[in-house]
Image (cartoon, grey):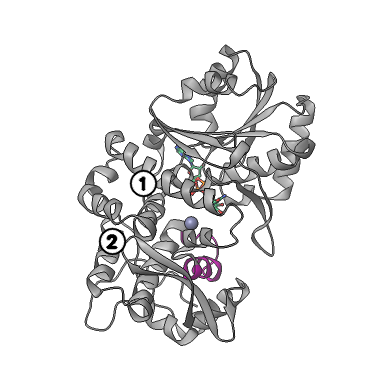
């Protein structure tokens, strides 16, 4: 088992990464001094596969868990589902020293985390992420929340977990498209902070795609180390934590204009990161060879790297960035790379530079099957 520590003073916690960790859930929680009654919040895809062993492990350690199942998918990240969770926690008489286990992907982590942050003014939270995206990103760092009709993640809190348990075995059942989407965040860590990780991903992509636990374990560990370091330095995103948003300015806007669900988040940010790499070449002198390596690595991970938008869709994309509060005076603030492994945030980019960054220049033919998915 590999352990990464998130250093936040008395709120520090461990991220434990390894195989067969589901069976250790109870013993790990027993070390944290919680009360007996607890809740496992999961979804309709993950629960049938992994809730029973989690419950058995908790019971064997003397806990009294109730399982709360929310619908699978992004729509579950809402106040109505959170309210239904509160009712079940009340019925099970959870108390101040009780705890909540979030067993699932980022959706479960965000909504269960939000419930933990708010029920009884805050219960302890254990993240048991079961998607690659959740293991390397959403379960670490304490951002929890739900969506409103007006937009994603508009209601939320910072509520750090007491423990993160990444069981590599759960990744075996993840749909291939979801796994590839998670790789977009993995590749991001290489670009923003670690050229050696980027090189390792280039060498090991086939084994990563085969979900070889021996290859996955050190890669997930490295991603968690990078996120832990960034969060330890800037917990509430007053500065450097912004580097985690590399590729996300265009990615979020693309998700918004194409209707949530057209692109998975990881797919949208693969396009966004490739675009950000092209902008980086223009603004910070990132070498063209590095831009090509970024694009090629996403392509080998089975992710889209270009989008061809009709003029009306382009206008909507730029408007969506404006809504994202990242635009001021015709300029957008971007995270851009100076070289692989080194980025700078708060870089100003003129809106006119964005359309040409969305696809390879003329004469560079590689395109993706998703190229027209976000047409107007
Ligand atoms: N809090 C943060 O810092 C943060 C960071 C990044 C993303 N997020 C949020 O995370 C969410 C996306 O998370 P996600 O990509 O994990 O999506 P998700 O939670 O919707 O999971 C993807 C799908 O896979 C299923 N699934 C999960 N684990 C499985 C397993 N082991 N086997 C089979 N199926 C499984 C889920 O039921 C779902 O259908 C978004 O809402 C996003 O806003 C939060
Ligand atoms: Zn992301």
The relative height of residue 231 versus residue 253 in the rendered view (above or below) is: above
Secondary structure found at label 1:
helix
User: Residue at 41% of width from left, 40% of height from top?
Assistant: 174
User: Residue at 52% of width from left, 58% of height from top?
Assistant: 241
CA–CA distance in space, label 2 to label 1: 15 Å
User: Residue at 58% of width from left, 58% of height from top?
Assistant: 237
Q: Give whichever of 222, 67 is nearer the camera.
A: 222
User: Residue at 27% of width from left, 51% of height from top?
Assistant: 201
Q: Which mark is residue 176?
A: 1
What residue is disc 2 on?
299
Whether residue 3 is visible here, answered yes or no, is yes
State the extent of the magenta-drawn residues as a range. Answer: 249-264
Please tell me in which quadrant of the rendered image residue 89 appears. Answer: top right
Percent from the top left, x then y, of residue 330? 55, 86
**Is label 2 or label 1 in front?**
2
Percent from the top left, x then y, of residue 108? 58, 42
């Amino acid at each position: 088992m590999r352990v990464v520590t998130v250093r936040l003073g008395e709120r520090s916690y461990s991220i434990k990464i390894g195989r067969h960790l589901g069976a250790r859930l109870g013993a790990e929680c027993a070390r944290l001094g919680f009360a007996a009654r607890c809740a496992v919040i999961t979804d309709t895809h993950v629960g049938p596969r992994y809730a029973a062993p989690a419950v058995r492990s908790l019971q064997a350690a003397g806990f009294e868990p109730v399982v709360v199942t929310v619908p699978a998918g992004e729509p579950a990240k809402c106040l109505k589902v959170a309210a239904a969770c509160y009712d079940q926690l009340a019925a099970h008489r959870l108390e101040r020293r009780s705890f909540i286990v979030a067993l699932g992907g980022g959706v479960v982590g965000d909504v269960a985390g939000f419930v933990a942050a708010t029920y009884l003014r805050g219960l302890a939270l254990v993240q048991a992420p079961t998607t690659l995206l959740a293991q390397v990103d959403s379960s670490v760092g304490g951002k929890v929340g739900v969506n409103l009709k007006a937009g994603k993640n508009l209601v939320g809190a910072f509520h750090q977990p007491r423990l993160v348990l990444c069981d590599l075995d759960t990744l075996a059942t993840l749909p291939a498209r979801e796994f590839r989407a998670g790789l977009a965040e993995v590749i991001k860590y290489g670009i923003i902070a670690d050229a050696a990780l980027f090189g390792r991903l280039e060498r090991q992509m086939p084994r990563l795609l085969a979900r070889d636990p021996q290859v996955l374990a050190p890669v997930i560990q490295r991603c968690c180390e990078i996120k832990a370091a960034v969060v330890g330095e800037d917990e509430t995103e007053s500065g450097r934590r912004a580097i985690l948003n590399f590729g996300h300015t265009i990615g979020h806007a693309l998700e918004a204009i194409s209707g949530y669900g057209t692109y998975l988040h990881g797919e949208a940010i693969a396009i966004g990161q490739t675009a950000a790499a092209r902008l980086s070449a223009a603004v910070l002198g990132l070498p063209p060879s590095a831009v090509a390596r970024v694009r090629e690595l996403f392509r080998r991970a089975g992710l889209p790297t270009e989008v061809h938008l009709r003029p009306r869709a382009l206008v909507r994309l730029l408007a969506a960035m404006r809504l994202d509060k990242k635009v001021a005076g015709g300029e957008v603030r971007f995270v851009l790379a100076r070289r692989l492994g080194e980025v700078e945030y708060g870089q100003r980019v003129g809106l006119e530079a964005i359309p040409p960054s969305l696809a390879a220049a003329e004469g560079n033919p590689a395109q993706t099957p998703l190229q027209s998915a976000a047409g107007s």
